[in-house]
Amino acid sequence: VTTSLLLALAVAGASPTQSSAPALAGVQPVPASESPSAVPAQSEAPALAAPQLPAPLEAPTETATPDGHSGWRHELDLGAHTTRFSSKEGSDYAFHSATLGYGVSYGLTGPFLRIAAIVPLQATQDGATYATANYYRHREGGDLLVGVQHRFTVRSTEVEVGPGLHGTFIYLPGRAGYRDFTALPLGLGVGASVRWKTSKERLSRVVTWGTTAGIAYDFRDPAHENDITHGFTFRLAIAIGLGARR
Amino acid sequence: MTRPVRIGAVAVAGALAVVAGLGACGPYAQLAQKLDVTAQIAGDTWIAAAGPGRSATRILLVARPDADGNAPFAFSELPSGAKVDTTTIQGTWTEVGSAGDVTLHVAHSYVLPGDNSGARRDDSSRTIRITATRVGSQLVLTGDPALAGTYVGLAEALRKLGAPAQVSAACAFLIPNLAVMTADIRIIGFGGNSMYQYQRPATFVGTIAGSVRVGVDISLTGNNAHTTIGFSGFQDFGGVTLDGTQVTDTSLAANGHMSGVLRFALTPAAPDPTGVSTPIQGSIDYGSAQPGNAIQINNGYPTGGSYLMSVDGGVSNVLVPVDIVNTPSSAVADCLALP
């Protein structure tokens, strides 16, 4: 009987108007901050406990979804980046880089953005391999993947995956006597992150760690007369970040 | 054909494009590509007229062969008219036997496209087979349409210009301008947005002697680019020497004007083996002395103004309209009386 009553009142409590107007006279509202611990006590007081159930509705929005996947996720990551592409003039290029990135996403299903600074360390063209430091004064670049993601749980691990627009920029200003190299392959990609909660907390958020990855198919380069026939970019990194609010 | 006019404008546009990530830098560059790979050589320079109406000029420089018959060479194809492709190849000329069988081992192929995508160099090797026949003072090449022609020694041909007082202003411009053109072909990125790279100036050697130095100053906030191409004792082929500086100032929309003065010396062959030839010297002013007549640039191309020509002991301050480089013609062949 108690369980049935609780369920009935819980449904009734889903209405804000009902929750703000006590159904049973004489029942004192329980502060939201006390609501989790108050539930067992409610079950021990069958007739009076039910009005306390609306309390979860007043909890932070980020924990309102069934799996706790709502809200912001912020991550810093460190990893590796490879982009390969072929030119219409018949050359095949590959650049292997170290990356330092930042990722942010929002909501159970919502937007995400992953941006990374890349440092091309090694490059190849048509089978010839070059240590970029030997030929270029600076080694700079960036990688961007922006799109829509969806979060779900796999064995207590939060997984986030979604498609997006991709771009990589490489700028290698040559040493004295050498020609600059630039590339701007653009395409479509998929980004994914897997994150685990830790017991630590910062800024009222759970600290997470995990991995983030992106793969893209590139087919445009407006900065080079679209001299690209096709290309692929892959990025894999270890990430640390802030998850849902406690 | 007046690449100096194009350079600044294109460089400016290139700078903006690279920074904004919107423009066309031309095809991908080669990785770890040296800007200048020219090895200076000494040898004989040959010139021929080619193409429809003799509107193109071919210049062949062949060094003296070693014991195995191998000699470095450079060959340039220079069509007249606006927005044309100009090319140069460099490599080794190997002549075997007395029948004139020649194998050209091409090591570097340059192209300066007429579409503002920028000069580029392909370092892949290839082979061209031709037949070289010497007929009197002429060199007749057959076997490959891209090189075929009846060539004469450039020093001999320069004698056709006559004494300094007889040299027309048009010829005084066109012949030195051939060396300007061959220089531009080898400046990687010239005529395209990759000129942005010469914010760090670079030097290219002349195939025979001297050098040319390229530098670009770009101000995005000031909406301008200042390009200088300085020639110093520059000889890309025998008989023509350049000194001085071309200057181009444009907006980021590749509109602007030129200035600067190039001094030239044309050295014809001596009238006899013991004689000493007298160079024809003069200057090309791109707009310094008469800014009102400066070469005007529109969208990276020379579209207005005049070259102010002077020849020591000859014409003085004669304006040659820019149309002389925008219209296909046999003017070079006519100046040198090429066959």
Image (tube, grey):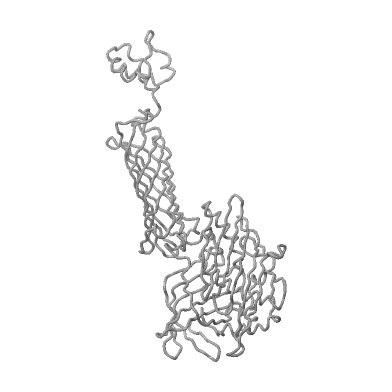
Quadrant of the image for the C terminus of chain B?
A: bottom right
| Left or right position of B222 against A144 | right
Q: What is the x, y in percent for residue A20?
A: 43, 16
Residue B52 to residue B203: above or below: below
The residue depicted at 43 percent of the width and 58 percent of the height is A136
Q: Nearer the viewer, residue A244 or A170?
A: A170
| Left or right position of B292 against A222 | right
Residue B270 placement: quadrant: bottom right
The residue depicted at 70 percent of the width and 82 percent of the height is B166
Q: What is the x, y in percent for residue B240?
A: 59, 77
Residue B196 to residue B206: above or below: above
Q: Nearer the viewer, residue B200 or B252?
A: B200
Q: What is the x, y in percent for residue B183?
A: 55, 70
| Left or right position of B247 against B121 | right
Which residue ends up furthest to the top in the rendered image? A26
Residue B292 to residue A66: above or below: below
Total residue callouts: 0
Q: What is the x, y in percent for residue A130?
A: 37, 61
Q: Nearer the viewer, residue B247 or A61?
A: B247
Residue A199 to residue B62: above or below: above
Quadrant of the image for the N terminus of chain B?
A: bottom right
Residue A191 placement: quadrant: top left
